[in-house]
């Protein structure tokens, strides 16, 4: 018997990529509304009540409305928006951080943001191990392909090919900051500096560290070892043992659901740069949702993923 999955918002960037990952799989029957039905509250309500699982690929306000439409149904929900990421009634959909069992048994899962995925993977294990202080004022620099901004930003970059770099979030208070602080276990909100580059997909997230100024901080080698032990055995997250001279994003990047972490350190150990590389549409969005869906459905965690 197949598992029925309703993708609410299947025409959007995240939804389309989830469909690509699930459509070839015999375990799932996809419920996707056509253009005449996808804005109908009644059609959506019927789909929620017919589904075993639902994945919300919607703006925040629409995701909240969708949860109300699903009320009374048996559908277990994965929300790819940021509407429920710090809601205690929802399980945060980062199995490597919150535990696979938590997600497998959850009825409501909130997909992590793309930038927070990199930041939390780099910092949460080190803060838990007390190799980094929880009360430090951290900074996070990050660049992403323009697909992370949805159809409007995609159209802007593809129409105006003269854009070389887009710095944004300059008023502070980016919507990703609360989850970055909460799931990294920090006392203070990090200073988050995101930017967009003229590539469709791909993301680099960096956390620079003044280790010599941090009381009790570990050495770069100790940080790398801790991350390696924390993610040991993960089929998705890799902690790289090497320190290459450069980290590149290529415009030709194929869809990928993996996450790679680096620790670069000064020779004297006084500074370090923690770097995460991922696909903003993969482990940063659609791949993460499919990973959680697999766990919730009792299927192999990496089924349908590109690793």
Image (cartoon, rainbow, N blue to C red):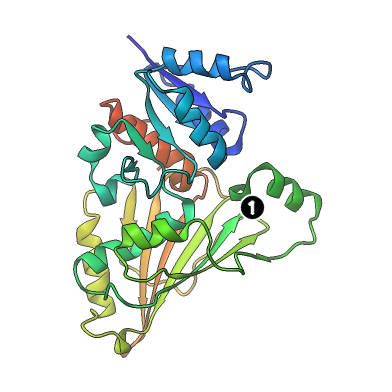
- Residue 249: horizontal and vertical position, in percent? 55, 60
Among the 4 quarters of the image, the one containing residue 164: bottom right
Q: Position of residue 17 (x, y in %)?
A: 54, 34
Query: Is 127 positioned to the left or the right of 240 in the image?
Result: left
**Residue at 27% of width from left, 52% of height from top?**
97
Q: Residue furthest top?
A: 1
Who is closer to the viewer here, 267 or 279?
Answer: 279
Q: Residue at x 42, y 21 (%)?
A: 25
- Residue under pointer 1: 146
Mark 1: secondary structure: helix
The mark tally for this picture is 1
Q: Answer few, some or many: residues within 10 Å of disc 1's Cα (few below 14, many 20 plus, some between 14 and 19).
A: many
Give percent across and percent down for residue 274: 38, 70
- Point 68% across, 42% down: residue: 151
Residue 61 placement: quadrant: top right
Lateral position of residue 1 relative to residue 196, left or right:
left
Is residue 210 left or right of 168 when viewed as pictured? left
196 to the left or right of 189: right
- Quarter of the rendering occupied by the N terminus: top left
Indicate whether 85 appears above or below 248. Answer: above
State whether residue 57 appears in this view: no
Report if residue 257 is visible in the image.
yes
Residue nearest the observer in this picture, 89 or 50: 89
Q: Name the one closer to the observer, 241 or 151.
A: 151
Q: Is residue 110 above or below residue 204?
A: above
Quarter location, residue 88: top left
Q: Quadrant of the C terminus?
A: top left
Above or below, 144 against 5 in this view is below
Instruction: List x then y, in percent, for residue 239.
Output: 31, 60
């Amino acid at each position: 018997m197949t598992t029925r999955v309703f993708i609410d918002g299947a025409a959007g960037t995240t939804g389309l990529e989830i469909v690509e990952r699930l459509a070839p799989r015999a375990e799932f029957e996809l419920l996707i509304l056509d253009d005449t039905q996808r804005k109908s509250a009644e059609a959506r309500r019927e789909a929620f009540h017919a589904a075993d699982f639902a994945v919300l690929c919607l703006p925040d306000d629409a995701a909240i409305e969708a949860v109300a439409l699903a009320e009374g149904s048996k559908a277990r929900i994965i929300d790819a928006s940021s509407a429920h990421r710090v809601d205690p009634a929802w399980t945060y959909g980062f199995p490597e951080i919150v535990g696979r069992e938590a997600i497998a048994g959850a009825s409501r899962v909130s997909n992590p943001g793309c930038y927070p995925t990199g930041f939390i993977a780099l910092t949460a294990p080190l803060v838990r191990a007390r190799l980094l202080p929880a009360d430090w004022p951290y900074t996070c620099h990050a660049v992403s392909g323009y697909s992370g901004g949805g159809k409007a930003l995609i159209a802007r970059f593809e129409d105006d090919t003269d854009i070389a770099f887009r710095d944004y979030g300059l008023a502070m208070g980016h919507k990703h900051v609360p989850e970055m602080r909460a799931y990294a276990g920090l006392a203070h909100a990090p200073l988050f500096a995101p930017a967009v580059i003229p590539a469709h997909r791909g993301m680099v997230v960096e956390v620079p560290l003044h280790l010599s100024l941090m009381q009790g901080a570990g050495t770069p080698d100790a940080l790398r070892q801790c991350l390696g032990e924390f993610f040991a055995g993960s089929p998705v997250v890799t902690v790289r043992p090497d320190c290459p001279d450069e980290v590149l994003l290529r415009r030709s990047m194929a869809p990928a659901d993996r996450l790679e972490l680096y620790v670069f350190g000064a020779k004297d150990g006084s500074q370090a740069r923690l770097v995460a590389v991922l696909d903003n549409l993969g482990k940063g969005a659609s791949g993460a949702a499919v990973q959680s869906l697999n766990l919730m459905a009792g299927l192999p965690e990496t089924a349908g993923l590109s690793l």
